[in-house]
Structure formats: structure tokens, C-alpha cells
Image (spheres, coloured by chain):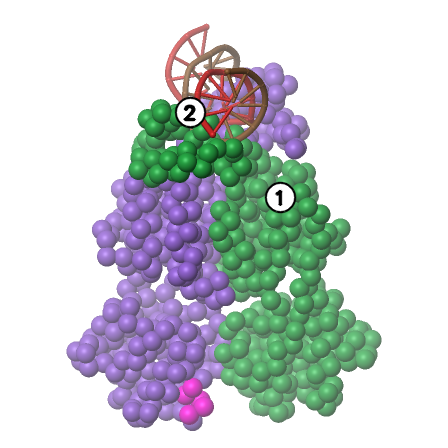
Chain colours: A purple, B green, C brown, D red
Amino acid sequence: MFKRITIKEFSDQIGVSTATVSRAFSSSGRISEKTRRMIIAKAQELGYHANIHASSLAAHKSNVISFFYPSIGYDQPDYFIMEIQLGLHAALQQSGLLLQTHPLPPAPHQQATLTIYRDYILSGGPQGIIIVAGSPESVELVEMARAAQIPYSVIGHMGIEPQYTVTFDNAAGAEQAARYFVKTKRRHPAYIGGQLDKRKIRGFAQGLNIPPEQVLHLPGGYTFAHGAAAFRELIQNHPETDCLLCANDVIAVGAMRAAFEAGYVIPERLAVIGFDDARFSRFYQPALSSVSLNMQQLGSSAMNQLFQQFDGKEVKAEFVTCDLIIRESC
Amino acid sequence: MFKRITIKEFSDQIGVSTATVSRAFSSSGRISEKTRRMIIAKAQELGYHANIHASSLAAHKSNVISFFYPSIGYDQPDYFIMEIQLGLHAALQQSGLLLQTHPLPPAPHQQATLTIYRDYILSGGPQGIIIVAGSPESVELVEMARAAQIPYSVIGHMGIEPQYTVTFDNAAGAEQAARYFVKTKRRHPAYIGGQLDKRKIRGFAQGLNIPPEQVLHLPGGYTFAHGAAAFRELIQNHPETDCLLCANDVIAVGAMRAAFEAGYVIPERLAVIGFDDARFSRFYQPALSSVSLNMQQLGSSAMNQLFQQFDGKEVKAEFVTCDLIIRESC
DNA sequence: TTGTAAGCGTTATCAT
DNA sequence: ATGATAACGCTTACAA
């Protein structure tokens, strides 16, 4: 095994104490600027790098942020999560903190994996934890973070006390979409998407000025195939449908695809609006209009919540707005 | 701060030595099955979790794998990388290893970030390193891994000794695409894409049975906008173009978009093939044909190389094949 | 501002 | 199979 130079050897060689060396690298330590410079230069020269595990042990902090998110499968990329991760990294820039990613796998293996994660959290591994709501395990993770007294921040709605949470106003976004449909004289709206998202339907109904139960709703999964299938089903009984809101962009693209095949011209005959404004959907033909959620802002807001906790400041719930982006599909 | 129960306290409470407790959790230790069970049960009960930093320090291993990849910008998701990360996580399943993600940021901040990464690697942080080739910094990272004697694996072509490398045969994929164009009687091929990828052009030329210099080549970036702009430029001088290979799917989608606008019907008038088989492009209208690279296999192969190094086994270069997937665009 | 030395919570070696 | 104890390499009172 490769032997790194230790703080003891290094400090001996340059003729100072280990404490001084340590101070030179910690931002807080009281040390003369001159000594610090000298030590940093010597460290470069001799190739000294503090052992990160020893530092973590002694200082009770690890510099790693753990990012937990529901995973729809190891063969199924999730654009939503990917963008959040991007936002996290952007916020982490220069902070010296490192990001660890932890997908919560789907059914078969989730228990084993969760055990590994639990050990990791409860052993004091991460310095902060970011959890994307959406699976039952997300809730357990929050409990672990609390139990271990590690700063955490939740992205999404979880039905728990909200101060450590970054949420977004899906309902308002859906309402904007509905109002747009009304304004552009659409008469026969429909909604495609899973039933988890009560908020979106509520907002849609509100913008339409009808009770939520009256929304023509095709539930189902969040995939391209689901979107296409749901649309085919929809027009069997409701061929008059002339505008469509979908719970995410992947569904919307699937539905548009089925719509073309059924001879619906977009946007003339059918207006379509998606949700989340996934990067690829703006390249679609026609470019998809979408309720945009700034997912990167989601990530950086969550990191801010963590930073506030590190600094012992009061943490405020963060809120990210949704905006309707009109492109070509409506 | 929250005080966790330490191995000392725990072992005292249950009446064994710390060594025995440690052995109960390490797979290697010689310990009776009965004692192990007892200790694990007690640990559950009393909530004992080994401090991960102390373990890492004492055992000289950290259980974290670091994943470094070129990032095209904090506002620009990279589908390619995302899929590799997915493959990595799939391979990591149940291994108890954790994944850390490290984007190599574009220009302005890369030096500062690289310094942080260097410290991390040279301080003995990660137990293994996976590097996606593609930026100049990638090469530096390999040198750091070597210097620190940490097992590593490179994904992509880097022009260094190849045994710790997972590569893929882009050239063969491009050649397949060319042969398909020839077989389907296309006469006027063109290639859109950055100049980094000599391999793809070479393969394309080979399949076309012409020298590489004779390939009609529109260089440029890897984005949607680049694809669209390149196509517009292309047809100014070469309106007869009837088939198109693009360096990736995003470019291809951009080019298709520009093609529609210019009145080209796909695939009748213009055949298009992309590269990488990004998830979204199969949803496009028409569904994009693409040279498919199993990116998840890339990830798991890289992890395998790491595992081989952990076990002291000889490491063989890994190779992932490319296959042409015909859909609707050609 | 700098040095001394006592932790930090494990693992691993050497006895028993 | 189990126990005692010396590392592991750093940070941080406390002292100077």
C-alpha cells in the first residue's frame, strides 16, 4: 500500500507543530498569514494532503452531502432527478462539499438497500441530507435524519412539518394552463396522469371553474407508453377533446405521438401542455408547451436550507414557483 | 451535538470486547456464528452503528467510489452521463459501496474545482475512481489516481495505456450506419458533429467506401441548436443531401427539426441516423434511428474493472459494442 | 501566534 | 474464539 506523508512527518520536516499545520488548512484557526502561506507552499512541494478520514473523525464532520431520491428503475433514467442533481452540484460549487447519490431502488431490493443507507446515516456519515419526496422510503429517511440529528432538506410534498422543505406550486401551474385553455376558447379539456398528484388536478379544475370531480381524468403511470395509451383510450369516448394537460412531459410526448397517429393536428385541433418542462420536450415537433418547474432552483434551494442549518440559522420553508411556458403545442 | 453510542460503550454494555464487536460486523473476522448473531441483535436493540469515519481511518478504506465526468455546464443536463451513472448504481447494488459524483465544470471554475478533487483523491478519500474521458482534466485525474495508487477505470478513449479502460466501438457503429445508407440506395451522405470524434467519421467513410477526407462534414458543437444550424448550412451548398449521420441524438433531433422547416420529408427525402440512442429520441416523431451504445453496460463494466482491482486480479480492458437501431427516421 | 497532548471511534496485531 | 491494546492521522483545548 502507498504510504502518504502524515501531518506528523510533514510538520517535523518543515519545523512546526501539527497543530499549526492543521490550522493552516482550517479556515477558522488563528494563525499568521505568513506561516499559513509557508505551510501551504511546503505542502504543495512535499505533497502533503490531510487524510480525509482522520479529519472527519477528529472534527466530527465529513464534508459529504447525501442525495436520496426515488428511482423508477435502474434501466429508466429520470430527467427530473437529473436536473435536481445538476442544481445541487451548482450550489455545491467551490464549497468543498462532496455529493453522494443514493437512488431508492424499486421493489425487490429496496429493503436491503435501505438498511445500507440507514447504517450510513446513523453512523454519522453525511454532514447533510437531501431527500426527494415520492416513495414511502423517503419518509423513513427523514426519520433517520432526525434520529441522527443530521441537517436535512426535503424536496417535494411529504405531509410532514414543512420548515425543512422545498415545495413548488403545481396547483398554480395547472391553473395557469387551464386559464390559457379557457382564454384560447378550448371547450373540451382532459387531464392525463397518475393519481398521486391531487394538486395538479385541483389547480386545473380551479382554472377551468369546475369542481375537481368533473375533470375528465385519465390516470396511469408516468411514461411515454402510458401517455400514448391513455390518449387512445381518451378519444374512444371523448373524440371531441380539444385540449390536454399532462402530469409530465414524457406523458405529453407520448400522448402527442398517439394524437398524430389518430390524425389530430397540434395545436389547431388539439392543444397540449405538459408539466416539468423537461429539456428534450422543447425540441419536439411541435415544441411542447409546459408548466415549467425550475428543477435546478429546487436543488439549490435545498442546499441553501442545509447551509442555514450548518450555520445554526433559522430555516425557512422554500418555495419554487411554476410558470407556464408557451411554445408550439398550444 | 447528538452523541452516538460508541463501540466501547456498546461492548461494555453487552459484555464483550470491542474487538469482538468489530469482528461481528466485518466479514473476515473469525468469530462464532452464535456470538455474531447475539451482537447484531443487541446492536439493533441499542442502536449501535459503527462510526464510518473511524472505520475508514483504521481500516484504510472508505467504501466510496468516485465518479468524475466532464460537465457541459450546470444548466445543461447530459443524458449520456446520466445513463452511465444509472449503470454504476445498478452495479453497486448490495455491494455496500457508495457513489460520489464529481462533475468537471466548464471553463471558469475548473481549476478551483480540480484542486478540491485533487485534495480529495490524494488524501485517500475514495476507494476507487471512475473517470469519463472527454475533457483535458480527465487525463489529470488519471494521473492523480495513479499517483495515489487508487484503483481506477476510464470510460472512453483517452490515448493512454488501455488496460484500465472501457471503450466502445464508435467506428463500427458509424460504419453500420453508412452501410445501411448504401443498402437503401442513398446517394448523398453527410455527417454533422464535433471534430473530436475522428473515429465516427472514419467508420462512416469506411462504410461508404470513400476516404475520410471526402466525407461531407459539418463540424460544431453537440447541442440541439448546433444540429439545426449545421443542417441549414448544409443544404445551402448541398441541397441534394439525402442521408445524414449525426454525432449524437441531440444534434440529430436539431437537424431533423431544421429539415422539417426546410420541407424535407423524413425518411422519404432524407434519412437520419443519430448516435448514442438517447432515451428521448425514440419518442420523437419520426422515432430516431440511432447507433446504440449501451451506456449502462459502460457503467457496470467500469465497476467490474474496479472490483477486479480490489480483488487483486488481473484487469482486462473491457469493450462495449455499438449497434444500429432502425426506427422510423431512415 | 504557536506548541503539547489528549482525544476522536474504529481495526488489527498479538496474546491467551 | 475472544480480549487487551497499539495504531490510524487528524483537530482542538489548554498552556506557553
Give the quadrant of residue A291. bottom left
Residue positioned most to the left: A211
Residue at horizontal 29%, vertical 43%?
Answer: A146
Task: Please give the label number shown on residue B91.
Answer: none
**Quadrant (top left/top right/bottom left/bottom right) for the N terminus of chain A:** top right
Q: Is A28 a magenta residue?
A: no
**Is B48 on the left or on the right of A50, as rendered?**
left
Give the quadrant of residue A30. top left
Asked if A259 appears above or below A132 in the picture, the reply is below
Image location (x, y in percent) of residue B72 = 56, 59
Q: Nearer the viewer, residue A299 or B49?
A: B49
Q: Residues within 10 Å of mark 1 (few under 14, many from 20)?
A: few
**Is B174 on the left or on the right of B121, as rendered?**
right
Find disc 2 in the rendering and name its residue.
Answer: B17
Image location (x, y in percent) of residue A222 = 38, 72
Chain assignment, label 1: B
Asked if A246 appears above or below B144 in the picture, the reply is below
Find disc 1 in the rendering and name its residue.
Answer: B310
Callouts 1 and 2 on one subunit = yes
* Sequence-wise first label, 1 or 2: 2
Chain assignment, label 2: B
Residue at horizontal 52%, vertical 44%?
Answer: B64
Residue type of the residue flagged with mark 2: Ser
Secondary structure predominantly adopted by residues drawn in magenta:
helix
Q: Is residue B261 visible?
A: yes
Q: Is A259 a magenta residue?
A: yes
Write down the region rendered in magenta.
A258-262
Residue at horizontal 28%, vertical 69%?
Answer: A197
**Quadrant (top left/top right/bottom left/bottom right) for the C terminus of chain A:** bottom left
The residue mark sitting in front, 1 or 2, is: 2
Q: Nearer the viewer, residue B171 or B91?
A: B91
Q: Is residue B72 visible?
A: no
